[in-house]
Amino acid sequence: MDHNDMTMTTPAATTGMMTMTMTSGSSMPSSTSGMDMGMDMSGSSILMSSAEMAMVFFQSVTTPLYSSAWTPQGQGSYAGTCVFLIVLGLLHRILIALRSIIFDSNPVLHRHGKTISSSDSDSYPGSRSDLELMGGQLRTQWNSHPFKVATETFRALLEVVIGGIGYLLMLAVMTMNVGYFLSVLGGIFLGTFVAGRFGTGDSHH
């Protein structure tokens, strides 16, 4: 009796184990498909966020400038920020003109030899005579511009200030705020209008 019960329950238990195994096996693909769907959704959200970050101009009076602490809170503070950018652009062009007045107005810098071209018919660019003329010009320029620590320090500091202001103006434009962009252009216009005649030979922006 007991032996028969054992033989009868053993196939049932085996069938139950097989059912559990098949059930667990069938649930694995569903969980895997769920993970795939989650990954697809996260990938699509990344694509959507990158599409939303497209560089387009916009109008806003609460756009931060240079830091989160500098965030206009209304029309008045936004107008003050725009005035600051106009003054910054004006200062940038004035400093460029100042550099031209101090350093580029030296006639030695614009002296070009009138006898550098050879009248020989066999002369060509890169020939020995051209190299000798270039070497002579370099020696003349070097001797006429002696190195002075004070002068070169002032020149380097002026270039750093001009470059720093230029990068600040660039960062303001990169906010894509229409008001900031127009303010930078207005400052450049005013600076060129006031002091542009002193830096006509300058190509920096």
Image (tube, helix red, strand yellow):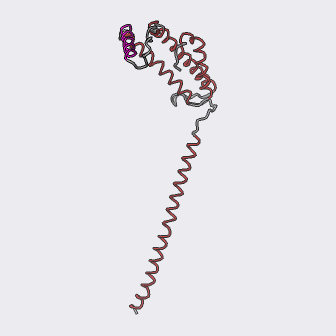
User: Left of 180 or right of it: where is 147?
Assistant: left
Answer whether residue 133 is magenta in the image: yes
Q: Nearer the viewer, residue 185 or 172?
A: 185
- Quarter where residue 52 is shown: top right
Q: Residue at x 56, y 31 (%)?
A: 175
Q: Nearer the viewer, residue 132 or 186?
A: 132
- Quarter where residue 122 is shown: top left
Q: Residue at x 61, y 35 (%)?
A: 56
- Quarter where residue 196 is shown: top right
Q: Main secondary structure of the magenta part?
A: helix
Q: Residue 176 appears at what percent x and percent y?
A: 59, 31
User: Left of 5 or right of it: where is 93?
Assistant: right
Q: Residue 57 appears at what percent x and percent y?
A: 62, 32
Q: Residue at x 51, y 54 (%)?
A: 39
- In the depicted structure, whether residue 55 falls above or below residue 8: above
Q: Residue 126 appears at what percent x and percent y?
A: 40, 20
Which residue extends farthest front? 121
- In the depicted structure, whether residue 12 falls above or below residue 51: below
- In the depicted structure, whether residue 13 falls above or below residue 160: below
Q: Residue 61 appears at what percent x and percent y?
A: 62, 29
Q: Nearer the viewer, residue 115 or 152?
A: 115
Q: Quadrant of the N terminus?
A: bottom left
**For the magenta stretch, what is the residue range?**
128-144
